Amino acid sequence: MDERILQLIGDAQFERELYEAATLNLEDRRNKLRFHNFAFAMRELVGHTLKRLAPDAEVRKCIWWQEKAEGVVPQVTRVERCVYATQGGLSNHYVRTKLRLDFAQEFNELRDAVIRLNGYVHITPEVFQLEDDDIEHLALETTEAVAVLMACIQECRAAVGDRLSSAISDATVQQIVGESLDAVDELATHYSLEQIYVDSHEVTCITSETVHIKVSGSLGVTLQWGSNSDLRRGDGAELDESFEYTCELTCEAANPDPEALEFVEDSLMVDTGDWHDHEDEWSAPTIDTFQDPEPLDATDMRSDF
């Protein structure tokens, strides 16, 4: 099975089982209907997957959606579902001029591949006697057309993330500086936030209205046991430590504005699990300098935008 199609399917169990059944049919070389069965299953798989990735109601809310002529039932086409699965509510202008992406050829090839599959679902003498070479070629052509959709989705999301990269880092730092880190606060009498690192970010979803972004990184903190007076007397202790974190940001989809990134409330999660796992091993806090070659200092709030 093609890994790209498995990524496209994700956790949809029915679609995964349907894809597995399609490939098993193709491998049954004793059966003259093997490609016909494969064609039927793949056609249905594409239909189910596109409808899940691009629900009618969501597609129709997008800025690029065009109402059909008066009196025509406004059905969503396969190509329009591909567009939504890839760019959600991003405007075509933004995709083409800001991201410099154009997937029209890939979407048309997937549409044409499904149309070709229809020709093998109804069995006639002309298509019944397919040679093995023809079957291999058709199966590869079909698989590639479906798998490329996943590549289009990944490329578009990566392009959006790259364009917003600096703003994502700035917005994350600014928000974390103002947050109360409850998970860290539980570990010691006091803590001070020293450094914030934005290690990676990913556009996880683009709906008709919103771009969703997940950010991952680490925090450099100083944990303090006892008061400042205790420290001066030698009765307290300090420890430099780092913890991984994740958080989520959003922005409007039609034309993502780096100045309008919004922090998702309660999305900041600081992972102190390792600390608790080894809590019993500490004999006494020791100072362990937190280092990283290029930290984003919490006091540096400058933006490139």
Image (cartoon, rainbow, N blue to C red):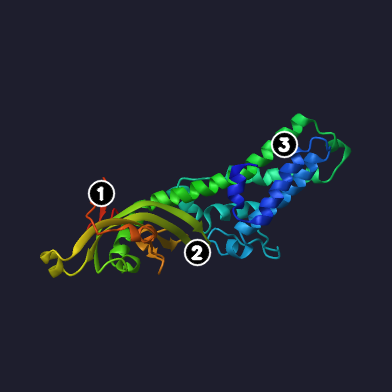
Q: Residue at x 27, y 67 (%)?
A: 188
Q: CA distance from mark 2 to mark 3?
A: 38 Å
Mark 3 or mark 1, whichever is nearer to me: 1
Mark positioned earlier in the residue sequence (2 or 1): 2
Nearest to the observer: residue 172 or residue 152: 172
Image spot of residue 50 (x, y percent): 64, 54
**Residue with the mark numbered 2:** 209
**Quarter of the rendering containing residue 171:** bottom left
Q: Which mark is residue 138?
A: 3
Q: At label 2, which amino acid type do we have?
A: Glu
Q: CA distance from mark 2 to mark 1?
A: 40 Å
Nearest to the observer: residue 209 or residue 91: 209
Q: At label 3, which amino acid type do we have?
A: Leu
State yes or no: discs 2 and 1 in contact (Cβ < 8 Å). Answer: no
Q: At label 1, which amino acid type do we have?
A: Gln
Image spot of residue 174 (x, y percent): 29, 62
Q: CA distance from mark 3 to mark 1?
A: 55 Å
Q: Residue at x 26, y 50 (%)?
A: 295
Q: Which mark is residue 198?
A: none
Q: Residues within 10 Å of mark 1 (few under 14, many from 20)?
A: few
**Residue with the mark numbered 1:** 291
Rendered-image quadrant of the N terminus: top right
Q: Is residue 296 visible?
A: yes
Q: Residues within 10 Å of mark 3 (few under 14, many from 20)?
A: some
Image spot of residue 103 (x, y percent): 55, 45
Residue that lies at the very extreme toward the right in this rendered image = 125
**Quarter of the rendering containing residue 68:** bottom right
Q: Secondary structure at mark 2?
A: loop
Q: Is residue 29 above or below residue 111?
A: above
